[in-house]
Amino acid sequence: MSSEEEEKSDSPDSTVRSLIRKLAGDLSPLPGFPDVRSDQILRDELGYDSVHQVELTFLLEELFGFDSLAIEEAPFMEIVSDLEDFTLDMISQGRAKTPSQSEIDRVRELIPARSE
């Protein structure tokens, strides 16, 4: 891997995208905590229903500290990359923040345990 590729993989954008994919996998109702890709459809490929989507939205809101109107203004998000792009856009506008490791750990504790 070149130093440019390494730098890109460690970029804030890459970190945010990875976090969102990890949370989407952790909250997916599918067994086995799937490895999530940006191009996957939340409902059809990851098993999300409206309850799971709301749960994911609340965790993302908590983790990234979206301002109070950001979620209300959000477009319909069908694909994981929609969540990633929206979050990065809110961060660039100063309407959300990149979380610290302690904030990530705190939010992960909110994820309900489930049996495999």
Image: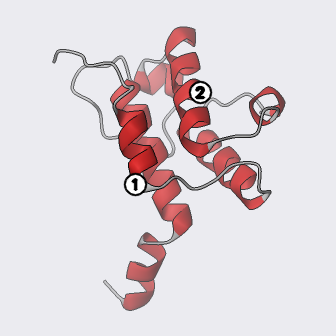
Which residue has dot 2 on it? 57
**Residue at the image position 61 percent from the left and 40 percent from the top:** 83
* Vertical relation: 62 (above or below) 45: below
- Viewer can see residue 36: no
Which of labels 1 and 2 is toward the front? Answer: 1
- Viewer can see residue 88: yes
Residue 74: image location, x then y, percent? 77, 33
Instruction: Using residue 86 as the reference point, say whether residue 102 is left or right of it.
Output: left
Q: Residues within 10 Å of mark 2 (few under 14, many from 20)?
A: some
* Vertical relation: 10 (above or below) 67: below
Residue 4: image location, x then y, percent? 45, 87
Instruction: Tell me which amino acid carries mark 2.
Output: Thr
Question: Which of the numbered marks, if any, corresponds to residue 67?
Answer: none
Q: Quadrant of the N terminus?
A: bottom left
Q: Quadrant of the C terminus?
A: top left
Q: Secondary structure at mark 2?
A: helix
Instruction: Using residue 59 as the reference point, say whether residue 10 is left or right of it.
Output: left
**Residue at the image position 73 percent from the left and 53 percent from the top:** 89
Instruction: Tell me which amino acid carries mark 1.
Output: Gln
Which residue has dot 1 on it? 101
